[in-house]
Amino acid sequence: MTASPHDGSSDSQAAGADTSLHVVPDPAPNPHATAEQVEAARSDTKLAQVLYHDWEAETYDDKWSISYDERCIDYARGRFDQAVGSSPDAQDALPYGRALELGCGTGFFLLNLMQAGIAEKGSVTDLSPGMVKVALRNAGHLNLDVDGRVADAETIPYEDNTFDLVVGHAVLHHIPDVEQSLREVLRVLKPGGRFVFAGEPTTVGNFYARWLGRATWETTTRITKLPFLASWRKPQEELDESSRAAALEAVVDLHTFDPSDLENIATSAGAVDVQARTEEFAAALLGWPVRTFEAAVPAEKLGWNWARFAFGGWKTLSWVDEKVLTHVVPRGFFYNVMITGVKSS
């Protein structure tokens, strides 16, 4: 990820970043990994993280239907509110002065939280140069006050007591040493500062989501071989590239979490007021086949009616999860777990 979407050099000073540390220019993205690099990445998880996420960076928002409008602003704010629950300290602190997103991807979580009024200034970090480049480009389009760095989540390149809030979405399961990363999060937080991580896979949820995804991919790619469905089949080279990306995905997804175990990890790292909550059970049973199907067929085949069905169905089932199933289904059976905690003051 480049610190600047324009020239590959660090924009930290211009964007108001912490300049007390020496900032090395970020490496350039590598969006087209060779077969040899992919093979080497099988035994080097951090190389795999960079290759896979550089590969995905330019198409990631489309793949996961990410946007920076009301739909995703409401979603991001909803995850924050659900994670912190009714904690008066979290709501009274709004807006946080400066927030950091760890493993930012394209900036989905932090940029939408900033638009929702959660934070005023932001910093994005990711191990992937491609993702930082896209996140900063997205921030620029939205006129948000954001700087960025390529960074390892286990050694965050900011001074102690820098941030009021640290957030992340679907990042902890990529980090080899989650507890060490949370220790770093607490180090860079100001006393009394809060972290919120959402979108992490539970152990049970990951099992059924993977199964549904594989079954949907196999069924779709086989059926579209039929002559009368040929127009629904992506070119074979695109399918092959998706399969290569999926091979790396199996390397970069390192953990699944039991909610109680994740609470224990955060507490062991030194956090206080730790709380894990889960979401998406029925919604995940629909969401994973839908997302996999979308990845397997040409985008032009899926119009407004499909988008309305996919989003409407997910929203309805999320309501069922929140209002009904969360009271009767054990929290470990839901797909997503979110965790929040505070740095002791």
Image (cartoon, rainbow, N blue to C red):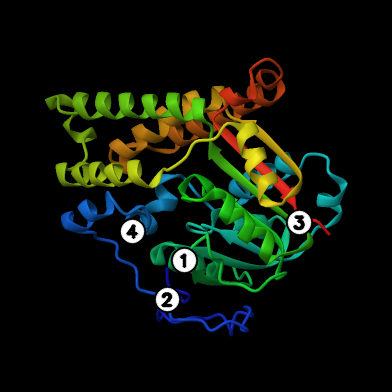
Q: Mark 1 points at which residue?
A: 132
Q: Residue 47 carries which label?
A: 4
State how far apart marks 4 and 1 are (Cα). 16 Å
State how far apart marks 3 and 4 are (Cα). 31 Å
The residue lying toward the viewer, choosing from 320 and 281, is 281
Q: Which of disc 4 and disc 2 is earlier in sequence?
A: 2
The residue lying toward the viewer, choosing from 261 and 247, is 261
Q: Which of disc 2 and disc 1 is earlier in sequence?
A: 2
Pinpoint residue 8: horizontal percent, then vertical percent: 40, 79
Pinpoint residue 35: horizontal percent, then vertical percent: 17, 54
Which amino acid, by three-letter code, is at mark 1? Answer: Val
Q: Which mark is residue 343?
A: 3
Q: Which of disc 1 and disc 4 is earlier in sequence?
A: 4
Q: Which mark is residue 26?
A: 2
Give the mark toward the camera: 2 or 4. 4
Give the mark toward the camera: 1 or 3. 3
Q: Residue at x 53, y 59 (%)?
A: 107
Which amino acid, by three-letter code, is at mark 3? Answer: Lys
Q: Which of disc 4 and disc 3 is earlier in sequence?
A: 4
Q: What element carries label 3?
A: loop
Q: Residue at x 48, y 51 (%)?
A: 175
Q: What element carries label 4?
A: helix
Q: How many C-alpha atoms fall within 10 Å of the one at disc 4: few (<14), some, or many (≥20)?
A: some
Which amino acid, by three-letter code, is at mark 4? Answer: Leu
Q: Which residue is drawn at 37% across and 24% down?
A: 211
Give the mark toward the camera: 1 or 2. 2
Q: What element carries label 2?
A: loop
Q: Residue 255 carries which label?
A: none
Please tell me in which quadrant of the rendered image residue 292 appears: top left
Callouts 3 and 2 close, C-beta under 8 Å: no
